[in-house]
Amino acid sequence: MKLELPHWPGAKLFCSTRQGGVSSHHFASLNLGDHVGDDPSCVSVNRQKLEKVWGVRPVFLQQVHGIDVVQLKSSQLARLPPADACFTDEKNVACTIMVADCLPVLFYWPQAQVVAAAHAGWKGL
């Protein structure tokens, strides 16, 4: 499989796999989901590893297979409502989407320097 990420001047795109983390058993290895029954301390370590590699803190949504979108502002990241898409115009705020059998959809508006990410369910695609 070949992963192709677009080149968007002014925006950075990242993709991770399940390799390189500390989770075990069926969560092995780089599980980032805190909602699937994995040991919370392992998920925390995995997320810290991702932040260290990326150089920016990923902002994880509480994804619910819905239609809500939230704007990510660095001053409000601790109080995010459930949503399946996010956008920001702030530097060092990483719109982060987790997927299993769904797909991440990425957006970029270069004139406004806005990035967005959405969780797209396989039924909707």
Image (cartoon, rainbow, N blue to C red):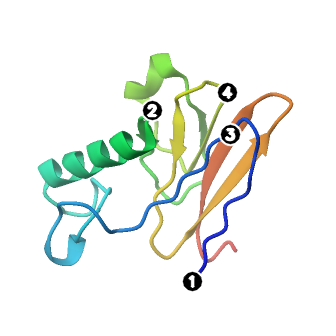
**Residue hosting label 2:** 80
Name which residue lies at 51% across and 59% down: 15
Find residue 94 and report its horizontal and vertical position in percent. 52, 38
Q: Earlier in the sequence, mark 2 or mark 3?
A: 3
Nearer-the-camera pick, 67 or 100 = 100
Q: Are marks 2 and 3 in contact (CB under 8 Å)?
A: no
Q: Secondary structure at mark 2?
A: loop
Check the image and report above or below for 68 versus 65: above
**Residue hosting label 3:** 11
Using a 10 Å C-alpha cutoff, classify the residue at mark 3 as few (fewer than 14 neighbours), some (14 to 19) or many (20 or more).
some
Q: Which mark is residue 44?
A: none
Q: Earlier in the sequence, mark 2 or mark 4?
A: 2
**Residue hosting label 4:** 89
Q: Please identify the quadrant where the C terminus is shown.
A: bottom right
Check the image and report above or below for 105 versus 47: below
Name which residue lies at 41% across and 35% down: 57
